[in-house]
Amino acid sequence: MTENITNTGKVVGINGNLVSVQFDGNVSLNEICYIRVDDIILKSEVIRIRGNIAQIQVYETTHGIKYGDIVEFTGEMLYAELGPGLLGQIYDGLQNPLPILAKRAGWFLERGIYENFLNYERQWHFKPTAKIGDTVRAGEYIGTVPENSFTHKIFIPFYLLGNYKIKSIADEGEYTVKETIAVLTDEKGNDIPISMSFRWPVKRAIKCYSERLAPTETMETKVRLIDSFFPVAKGGTYCIPGPFGAGKTVLQHTTSKYADVDIVIIAACGERAGEVVETLTEFPELIDPKTGRSLMERTIIICNTSSMPVASREASVYTSVTLAEYYRQMGLHVLLLADSTSRWAQALREMSGRLEEIPGEEAFPAYLESYIAAFYERAGYVRLPDGSTGSVTIGGTVSPAGGNFEEPVTQATLKVVGAFHGLSRERSDARKYPAIDPLISWSKYKGVISQEKSAFCRSILHHGDEIGSMMKVVGEDGTSLADFIIYLKEEMLDAVYFQQNSFDLTEANCGKERQRYVTDKLIHILGSDYNLNEKDEARSFFNRLRQKFIDWNYTEFLSDSFKKTESEIDSIYDDANGTLSNEAKLLFKGGE
Amino acid sequence: MNIVFNRIESITGSVITVRAKGVKYGELAQISTRFGKSLAEVNKIDGDIVSLQVFAGGQGISTGDEVRFLGHEMRISFSDDLLGRVFNGSGDPIDKGPALTENLKPIGGPSVNPTKRILANRMMRTNIPMIDMFNTLVVSQKLPIFSISGEPYNQLLARIAMQADADVIVLGGMGLKYDDFLYFKETLGNGGALSKTVMFIHTAADPTVECIKIPDMALAVAEQFALQDKDVLVLLTDMTNYADSMKEIAITQEQVPSNRGYPGDLYSQLAARYEKAVDFANSGSVTILAVTTMPGDDVTHPVPDNTGYITEGQYYLKGGRIEPFGSLSRLKQNVNASTRKDHRALMDGMIRLYSAYKDTIEKKNMGFSMSRWDEKLLKYGELFESRLMDLSVNLSLENALDLGWEILADCFDKEETGLKSELIEEFWPE
């Protein structure tokens, strides 16, 4: 990495990864600096300035630093480098490409080794779309390059303010990301050369759009329980809190495979390295049904696992959302999955403790809420300067201490997200996956099935759950047959629709047409009265029905075996003289 | 470069300060007191005030004692000579053998580049059905054994060590009772495993600071063996003692506590250790099994809680059995698809029914009459507990699966199991 040195200082104190530096001249907050230790340099960020002492957080381990070591300031804030070649990459939290670090350093992440964020040698086929004399602004594009199956737009850098005239622009051809691709003239007549890549400070949101729109379009995750009952919208936000072992990561992993978006950014923030390896092994082999190409080509992984330095864990969520916003600017729909935001919050807590700030609840800093809110606010559905639309959807997992949702990170997150998928230990212990608890979860977005149908299923759920709790007290004998049947219906709804096997390809990838089709069938079954005379008969009837329904879920949609199993379900239904209740009939009125 | 000081400015608990320049963060020093020599580690530098953590604790240190900086960080000698040896938390031998000084390697080194890891995909057989069948242990996995005091966790650990197929076993004991240490030595010795074992032992009577170094040393050694193509199994007991030592030191140093007195970086500290579990491509591996006792049987206690978020599952040891609820091996999916095709479905189905059995037991205890279905569940639950769950059961995976089908067929009709019809046709015993 080459950086300009704007100022220098010397180390006067070290406490964990917080280093105090004495300096002369000017130093700005959040600026990047490097500590020289022996023959290596350690990247750091200024997080507090008091008099002539700057306190910096080091993105590496600090052992070996001593009093008097030289610190070089760069004058630049922590930035991401934006340009073609980001897709398919595996970065650490500071955007160093991990495969290249592995080539240089081998097995381990040796400190002080930094790499170019983008490949400076690779040539891209540039096609200009603007011409000399055009007036352009930040966020407008002047050409495109093909990147995998996407058209990657080459933007006027987002940091340029005001209007510019294109003085020259390169012809169609092969260029690297650092070559000058155009020269702009500003209003004062100064020339500004631009290339296909530029830097953007990660902690600032990219706002080069015309307007922010309401998130109304459903983002299909192919998870039945989410899409039908607790949907997520493109440009929306959602969170998945849950105790450990409840399946947060498996749920995100499934979403990253099947979600109906153009690009997925996975921010593995302070979690297990093994999970990233899983993605790395699996994704190149999987085919994206939308493009027919490898799933890896639509994915960027930002990986700052739990044993990597804490300070860059904090940086990693910002790096991820910046890359998401960049691709959104091209009119693409981007999904950012952050796993886990609690680890990020803990990184804030560790630094806050070292800075000896007055602690808030559970020693989290007082600014925790505003930081979380600002992060989720970077999601959105926007109209771009060229009239097209793009979106960033953010889904964050939360790992509450003790699985208790009352803790500060969960509460701060719930205030700002549009959907809440709360995972429960009871459901995961009973192997009911996904372990999203339908009784506590909610969503403010529109799902793939109609409001009325979803409300009907919910009423069965709540009613059945009440009867279930009552039965625990009064026993099965004390429960009327009618109530018992509702209880069985609720059990069936849970078993055949809420639960979904994410390891079976057909079962895991349940599209909206199938969800609509299957819920209609299910509502027919749940909304019908049967000729059942005793509880054991009722139980065995619903067991048979459930069994067939589960088999049905594993068949290919509209295939022969799908139709065959469906007719078997129908005949079980007919055998018990199923008749649709009036309440359910209303749901199917109006041509549906 | 050895800098020597004869003036200690302050002594608080196990932390001393001296005025010195040119000292590196993390450097070791040797302190000579009238009770002998002890190592100390630099853990804070503020101007020319250097704070050191004294391994033997602060007791008996005089302001006039000699502090000699050694110019390097904590290291451990690595070679095959380690096998069969026992060391304490300062890295000194406690088995009357010679000290090892060659080929010194730093401890607590950097983490493995995630792109250099490979997917854990080798099953580690233990012949304990609750592990092999329901929560398969995988090479390079990191798993805690959550337990309350009094459970036979060290016995379980020793049994896994004896039956699991590992080239090298590294045992890290933290706050270990001396008789437990002897138990390990004897069991592994009788099983002929002592010659492939290295032990790092901190007993309950040793100074707190030494406890903190145990996992780092054990894992540094394990990592070195793994890089020599060995499959290493690291057994740590008990990580709660380790966390409590960290708490004690953090509080003495006036750090702001986050949850029940534990330092805010508890998660990161634990993660840095557990993440040493790795399967190196074309080389060896490190698998970690760590006992974490839960104070008051409370899984939401900060230590088991943070651990659960780091590790790839957990085994709950309760009433002398590995509990099926809550116990989880996250990596089992990587291996149990290729064991036998009924493995996954049978595992899930049997647990679901066992959960229904638990509900029935609850109803029964409240005095409700039992339906025909309840009776079936009761029979099933008893069979499941006695024939599969009991820790003394020693069965290969395949035999355990067959037994599972037998139990199901004994208790239920086919469609009551909720299993895929295709599997039922193939495996249902006549």
Image: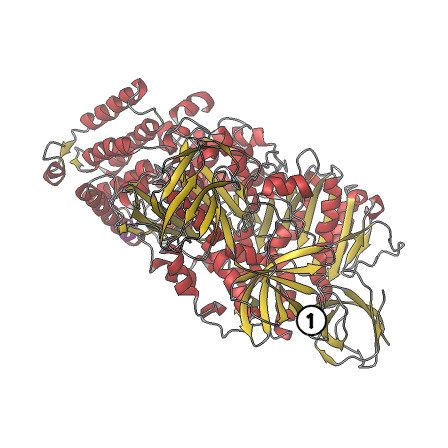
Q: Indicate the colouring scheme.
A: secondary structure
Whether residue A407 is visible to the viewer of this picture, yes or no, is: no
Q: Residue at x 81, y 48 (%)?
A: B78
Please name the predominant secondary structure of the magenta segment in the image.
helix
| Image location (x, y in percent) of residue A301 | 50, 43
Magenta span? A467-471
Residue at 24%, 22% in the rendered image: A567
Residue B62 visible, this angle = yes
Q: Residues within 10 Å of mark 1 (few under 14, many from 20)?
A: many
Who is closer to the viewer here, A65 or A168?
A168
Q: Is residue B184 above or below residue A68?
A: above
Q: Position of residue B224 (x, y in %)?
A: 75, 45
- Number of dots carrying numbers: 1
Residue B144, percent across and down?
59, 50
Q: Please, which residue is most extreme toward the right here?
A: B98
Front one among A325 and A456: A325
What residue sits right under mark 1 in the picture?
B45
Q: Residue furthest top?
A: A560
